[in-house]
Amino acid sequence: MKLTKTLLAGTALAMTAGVASAQDMANDMTIVSWGGAYQSSQLKAYVEPYLEMHPEVSVTWDESSNEAVAKLRAMNEAGNITWDLVDVVAADAIRLCDEGLAMEYDPDELLAEGDDGTSASDDFGDLIVSDCYIPQIVYSTTFGYRTDMVPEGVDAPSNICDVFDLEKYPGKRALEKRPINNMEWALLCDGVAKDEVYDVLATPEGQEQALAKLDTIKDDVIWWSAGADTPQLLADGEVFMGSTYNGRLYSVIEEQDQPVGMMWDAQVYDLDGWIIPEGLDEAHLARVKDFIMFATDTQRLADQAKYISYGPARASSAPLVPEEMKQHMPTDPANAENTFLYNYEFWADYRDDIDAKFQSWLAQ
Amino acid sequence: MSDTTQTGPIDMGNSAANDTAEKKGPMLAADGTPLKRSLNRALRRQKLRALALIAPLLIFVLLTFIAPIADMLFRSVENDIVSNTLPTTTEALEGWDHTTGEPPSEAVFEDFYFDLFLASEAKEHTKLGTRLNYEKTGVSSMFRSTGRGLDDIGDDYLDALEETDERWGDGDFWYALMSGTGTSAPEVVEARRKALARMSGDSLSGDVGFAPSNSIATLLPTTVRAYSDFAVYTALVDGDVVAEEDPWESVYVGLISDLEEANVDGYTGPEADALKAAKAALPGIEQVSLKSFFQSEDKDWVDPSVWATIQTYSPKYTSGYFLNAIDMQLTPDGIEMRPENQQIYIMLFKRTLFMSMMIMGSCILLGYPVAWLLANLPSKSANLLMILVLLPFWTSLLVRTSAWKVMLQQQGVINDVLVWLGLVSDGDRLVMINNQFGTIVAMTHILLPFMILPLYSVMQTIPPTYLRAAKSLGATNWTAFWRVYFPQSVPGIGAGSILVFILSIGYYITPEIVGGTTGTFISNRIAYHISSSLNWGLGAALGAILLACVLILYWAYDRIVGIDNVKLG
C-alpha cells in the first residue's frame, strides 16, 4: 500500500514536471550535422551529456549539412521548417543570414560566459563572423603528403609553394574543385604578399595571374569535391600531396596509420558552427536555446577537442584541450607558424564571378 | 471508345436514312428520350467513370511532378525581387540615363534610402544583394554593410531634434503628431502595407491601428511614408502597438527632409509647437545629403554601373538567366557575349550531348550481343545470364561508381595488371579516370541494363525460324542477320537508345565522381547552382534548356524512326 502510494505520488510528480517543461520547451530536437567522425565528436562531447541531464528529450540527427543551405531555402519556401539546429561552415552561415533563413541572436544573451568570466562575445571574439553564427570549432584546410613518395635526398615538403614545384616534388596533387583557397595559394606562390592577396584577387588581372599559376600544375591535379577524397587518394598512393580538412588527415595518420605527413604551411582557417533556422515555434526555440547554452560553454567545446582534432572556437576552452591532442590542432603554435585567414566578405562578393572563371578555366 | 469510332462511318453511310428519319422526328430510345441524347449521355458517363478511375494518378502526377517542375522552370524568368524590394527606387530610376556616366539624382537616393530601410528591417535587403551580385560582383556586400549603417544618419538627426524638444524620440509623441486631427488618409498606410506584403511575400492582414490625418500627410509626405512603414511593420509583423514603440530612424530622416520644404506656420494639429520649434532649429542642424551618406557607406554607391544594373534588372521578368545559360549576358547596353574566360555552358551542353551519344552508342555495341545471347540460349543458361545482367542493376549507384574508381585509377586494378603483364611501364600508368573516358566507361556500365532489357524483350519475339528460313534460301550468316534479324530488332534498339540517352543526359552523380574536369556534364553545373551558389534562376534556365533539348531530340527521333517503332517489352 505504502509502496503504491509512493509510486503514485512519484508518477504524479514526474507528470507535473513533465507538463511544466512541455509547456515551455519542446522535447524533440532535430540536429543537422555532417555525419562521420565530426558528428560523433558532437554526440560524445555535448549531446549525450545533455540527454543525460534531460532524459525526456529525444534528438534526431539529419546528416544534411552539405546541402543545408539549399534545403533550408526549400523548407522556408514550403513554409515548413523541420530542423531545429543546423551545423554549417561560416560561408554558408553568412549566406543563410543574408537570405533571412537563419536567426540573428545576441551572443551575450544566448551563449554562456567563459569559465574565466569573459563575456561570450569577447570569448568568441572575431569568430562570430555573422550575426546568425554560433561558432564551435576552428578547422583548417591544409596539405597532407605521402612520406614514402618524397624523392630521395630531398626534404619533406614544408612550404606551400612546394605544391607548385613539380620538379622538386613530382607526382599528382589533389586540390578542391573550387576557386576558394586554391586562388589564394597560387597568388602566395606567385610572389604576392600575404596581406595583399585579396586586393590582387579582386582585380581581373589578379584572377588571371592566379589561374596562370595554377595552370603550371593543372595537368597533375586531381580535383576533389568531397572531403573524404583526398585521404582516400593519399591512402591509395594516387597523389603525392593533397589539400583537405586537417581532421581528415589526422584520422588517416593516427587512426589508419598511413604513411602520410602534415604540411601546415599556409593552412587556411575556417569555422564550423551552429545556426538556428528562422521561424521556429516558441517551444522548439526554447529547447534549442537551452541546448546551445550548454553545448557551447567552455568545458563542452574543450571536450569536443578530445574526439577530433579541431580547435575550440572559445578562447577560454584552449587551456582545457588535452595535451596529446594539442599537437594536432590547427591552432597549435608549432602548426600555426604561417597561417592564412579566409576572407568571408570577399568570397561572398566574388564567389560567383571567380567561380565562373575558374570553372571555365577547368573545362579548357 | 469503339462506339465513338463507329458512329462516324455509320452516320456517313446512312445519311440518307437519317434524313428520312429526321423528317419523321428524332429516333427515340425505349424510355422515350431521343436516341442520340441518350447515347451521348451513356458515353459521357463512361468517360467520366474512366476519368474518375485515373483521377488519383492524374492528380498525383500533377501535384508532385508537373506543378513543381513548372514552378521551378518559372524561376528562370522570374525577377520580381528587385521591384518588390525597391518599388519606389525602380520607378524613380526609370527617368535616369546610365550613359551620362553620372550617378542618379539625390531624389533617387532618397527613395532608395526609405526602400532600403524598410527592406533591411524586414531583412530582405541581403536577398536582393545576393540576387544582384549574380549580375554585378560586389553588390552583395554593399547591401549587407550599408544595411547595418542605415540607422546612423537618423540617430544623428534625432540627437539634434531632441535638443529642441525632448519628446522627439518618444513613441506616443510621434503617434499623436502623425495621427493629427480631422479627416484621415488610411490609403497611405494601405499602400505601405501592400508594399511590405509584396516584399516579404506574406499576406499581412490585420489592423495597423494608425492612419495619418490628411493635413499631416500633405504637409510631411516623406515622414508619413516612413512612419507608415514603421507602423505597418510594428503592428502586423512584430504584433506590437504602434503608439508604444519608438519610431525607426528613417522617420527622423524623412522629417528633416520634409521640414526643408514644408511650411508649418499654419499647422494647428497636435504637437504643432514642437514641429515649429524643429523647423526653426533646422538651419542649425547639420544635414547630410543621402547621396554622400551612401557614398560614405560604400564608394561604389555613386558608381553609375551599379545603378545601371539595378535599372536593367528592374522588370518583373528577365531574360537574364537564360542569356547567362547560353554564355551571354544582359547588360545596360543590351545583350552581349560573356567574356571568353567566363564562357562554359554552351561547351557543357555540347559535351553533355556528345557524351550521352557516346554512352548510348557503346551501350548498343555491348548490349546487343548480350541481348541476343539472352534471347537465344537455352532457358537454363539464359536465366543465369539474366541474373548477371540484373545484379548490377540492383546494386547501389554509388557502389558501382566507386568500384570503377578502384578499377580504373592509376594505382588501380587494371593498371596494376597491365604493369604486371609488362604491357605498360610503372612510370607511365594509363590515366583512365577523372576524364571523359572514365565517365563513358562507368556510365555505360551503369546504363547497360536499360539497353539490354528492351532489346531482349524485342528479340524474344523474333521467331528463330526466320533466320533458318533465310539461310535455307541461300543467305549467308551475315545477310541473314543483317537483312532479316536486325531490322526486326530495331524497335528494341530504339527503345533502349531513348532510355539510355535521356537517362544519361541528366546524370550527375557518376560524372561528378569519375568525371574530373573534362568528363562532367551540364547537370553538374545545375546541381552546383541549386545546392551551392543558390542561383536557382540560372539553374532553372539551364534545366529548361536541357528539357527543351530532350524534347526536340525526342521529336526528331519520332520523325526519323517513329515512336510507334519503339517497343519496351
Image: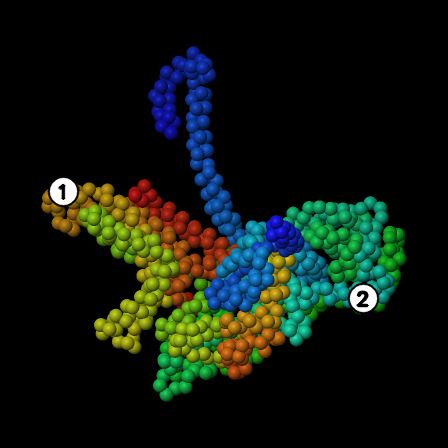
Label 1 is placed on what type of residue?
A: Ala
Residue at mark 2 = B159
Mark 1 burial class by Cα count in 10 Å: few <14, some 14-19, many 20+: few
Q: Residue A4 or B461: which is nearer the viewer?
A: A4
The x, y position of residue B568, in whole percent, is 31, 44
Residue at mark 1 = B469
Mark 2 burial class by Cα count in 10 Å: few <14, some 14-19, many 20+: some
The x, y position of residue A318, in whole percent, is 58, 76
Answer above or below: position of B450 versus A43: above
The x, y position of residue A222, in whole percent, is 40, 71
Task: Specify whether B488 is left or right of A292.
Answer: left
Q: Residue furthest top?
A: B24
Q: Residue B123 or B15: which is nearer the viewer?
A: B123
Q: Residue at 33% of width from left, 63% of height from top?
A: B404
Residue A320 picture quarter: bottom right
Could you tell me if residue B160 is visible in this image? yes
Q: How is the image coloured?
A: rainbow
Answer above or below: position of A284 versus A298: above
Q: Chain for mark 2?
A: B
Task: Specify whether A221 is left or right of A302.
Answer: left
Say how many tags the image has.
Answer: 2
Q: How far apart are marks 1 and 2 (CA)?
A: 104 Å
Q: Residue at 60% of width from left, 68% of height from top?
A: A296
Quarter of the picture containing the N terminus of chain B is top left
